[in-house]
Image (cartoon, coloured by chain):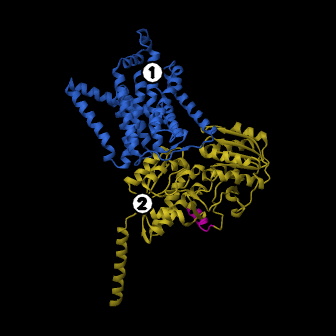
Chain colours: A yellow, B blue
Amino acid sequence: MNLKSIALRAATASAAMLLAATAFAVEPVKVGVGIAQTGMFAPAAIPALNAYKMWADDLNASGGLDVAGTKRPVKLIVYDDQSDFTKDAAIYEKLITDDKVDLLLSPYATPAHFAIVGVLERYKFPMMGSTAASVQLKAVKPGNIWFPTSALPDVMGPELVKLMKAQNIKTVAISTLQSPFAQEVEKYLKMALKDSGIKLLSSVEYAPDIRDMTSIVSKMKSEQPDATFSLSFPGDSVLFMKAAREQGLSAPFQFVLVGPSAAFFSKIFGKNLDGIVTMGHWSPYQTKWPKAMPFFEEYSKRYNETPDYLDVALAYMSCEITQAAVAKVGLDHDKLRKEISSATFDTIDGPVKFDGVSNASTPTMFLQNQEGKPQIIWPASDATSTFQKKGPWAN
Amino acid sequence: MKTRIFSLAGIAVLLALCIAAPQMLDAYSLGVALQLLSWIALTQSWVTFSGLTGYVSLGHAVFYGLGAYVMALLWQSAPLWEILLGSGFAGALLALVIGYPALRVSGPYFVILTLGLSEFFKYIVIAVEAGLESSGRLIFGAPDPETLYYIMLLLAVVATLLTWGLARSRWGAGLRAIREDETAAETLGVPVTFLKIAAFVISAFIPGVVGAVWVLRTTYFEPMQLFSPTTSFTIVTMAIIGGSDRAPGPIFGAAFIVLLSELLWARAPHVYLVILGVLLVSFVLFVPKGISGQLAWLMRRRRA
């Protein structure tokens, strides 16, 4: 070993030690989340939390989060809101003032988002929203929260009518859970149905503690509509699907609002899920979004189940947007606010740009399960497949 | 006399600390204090009726939810204080309307009836909101937490004074007589119907205002959460743990549960409700008079 190689090795070792020391010295970026880990929302919220965890782990494995040119490890601080949105304001206040987090990720579901709007305003803390969808979002003052969803009821109503007209649907029956989001969809769907040429045969609402939907499905079946709408949340969506399977509901167009995009739904219903139309604006099979399939594969492999095509996709998009903004401008809240408000972000759901608090880039879409795969069937510009009539139920 | 002076001094110090709290606490701790005060006010209001009469009400969630609903409907259409009072009166009025038929039954029938009425009213609000095509109500421009804290402190103090005053008054003696033997009380000339309804109406005013303040804290009204029966169950739990026959009881009960929850929810989210359940059963079995009753017994024993 000559002197030159010894010097080279010593220099390399010193550089490595210096790098290691620097890595240890770098403060982690603290990212706070309050989300339902227990309670009624937990089954749907935990997959969204899994998306957050996967994002953080991937970042740490690749050297950390790029903070305006400097890589820093990410540390997630997660609290359980017990599915009680009245706890979220206190949790996010704790994250901001007690844990002194650098960034926030959002809680699960619209009410929890609404419950922290005031806290974000008070501390001028920008945060990407995720699993929130309501016409009321548009009333939120822009600047501290943004919503990546494009499944907003005032657009969904007219788009659903266009989709039905394209399938030559003539008659419709609707059942609606008495819950804010479902009722908003009902309201805008009914408005769009007026003067559309599609006849509304019946519309019933039911209370959130419903235990059985046999009579509702039975009534729908007796009316023989071309299209049925179950404007329901996961719990009652399961009840509706079970009753529809038992009674062999035969409408060629069957829409179920929330649930069919979740992994547990396909575990319950298997092939019977084929043909069900649902809301959603992401599919791993959309080849023009190159990040979609790698995300799908990584998530499926890591958690041994497919991601929810709606909630998990939205949760991960919120991470991607936060990450891209931090890479560009760092952690300064004013700069982050400006960046998120003005830039276009490359996500698993394609490019996203905000107008006020709303996603102005992603069109409202609808998914249909076809041979076990969620395919985008509307609008034609983003479709990965065409609508197929719901086939007979298997028992 | 000496004990009395010490007690008064202790209360004055506690009150001074409560008044100074927003200047001493960080934002999160202030949020916890706000929560604690709300539970003290709610549990005190429950004790003024159920603790003294023995009529166990599981209907306080409805007065709380109604107050929240009134605030959500009227926010920014009238001054804050008017809406707060309106929320309280809405709770009291509802208690008057449902009190007369409900208080004709007692024991387990009354418990089930109040729970049933509470759930019934929740679904009425859900149906009304559906009819109005409302999908939850967002509240913008709510007062800052310091303001809400002072309102809640006032409510907790008023509710505590109410329990304290009522327990020592002729009305309180009448209510206790109803608890011990209603028929005997009536025979002795206690106006049982009037006293029961009056106590029920008074006890419904405070939860109405607390609900109105709390919805300003959460900034979003959604009936399923704000009319949740869990509110009633929590109140009863706090009263049992703290002791439901005297004013310090709800303070001990609420402080115990809120502080224990604070210690556990972040560290042991999956077991903390189990721990609370075990504690509740333990208190019912081994400390039936609650923390305040046990402390009073210990002090009496020490003096003896």
* Residue A108: percent from left, percent from top: 53, 51
Residue A161, position as x, y percentages in the image: 73, 52
Q: Chain letter for mark 1, please.
A: B
| B92 or A147, nearer to the observer | B92
Give the crowd class for mark 2: few <14, some 14-19, many >=20 residues within 10 Å: some
The structure residue drawn at horizontal position 66% and vertical position 42%, both measured from the top left corner, is: A176
Residue drawn at x 46%, y 35% as measured from the top left = B82
Give yes or no for contact between labels 1 and 2 (Cβ–Cβ under 8 Å): no
Asked if labels 1 and 2 share a chain, the reply is no
Q: Position of residue B59 (x, y in %)?
A: 50, 29
In the displayed orientation, state which residue is furthest to the front: B78
The verdict on residue B14 being magenta is no
**Helix, strand, or loop for circle 2?**
loop
> Which chain is indicated by disc 2?
A
- Residues in magenta, as a range: A289-298
Where the N terminus of chain A falls, by quadrant? Answer: bottom left
User: How crowded is the residue under tag 1: few (<14 C-alpha within 10 Å), some, or many (20+)?
Assistant: some
Give the residue at the far left of this rendering: B2
| Residue B198 image label | 1
Q: CA distance from mark 1 to mark 2?
A: 53 Å
Tag 1: amino acid: Ala
Q: Main secondary structure of the magenta part?
A: helix
Please indicate whether residue A327 sits to the left or right of residue B295 in the image.
right
Three-letter amino acid code at the position of disc 2: Asp
Work out whether A252 lies above or below B9. below
Q: Which residue is mark 2?
A: A102
The residue nearer to you, when weighing A167 against A162, is A162
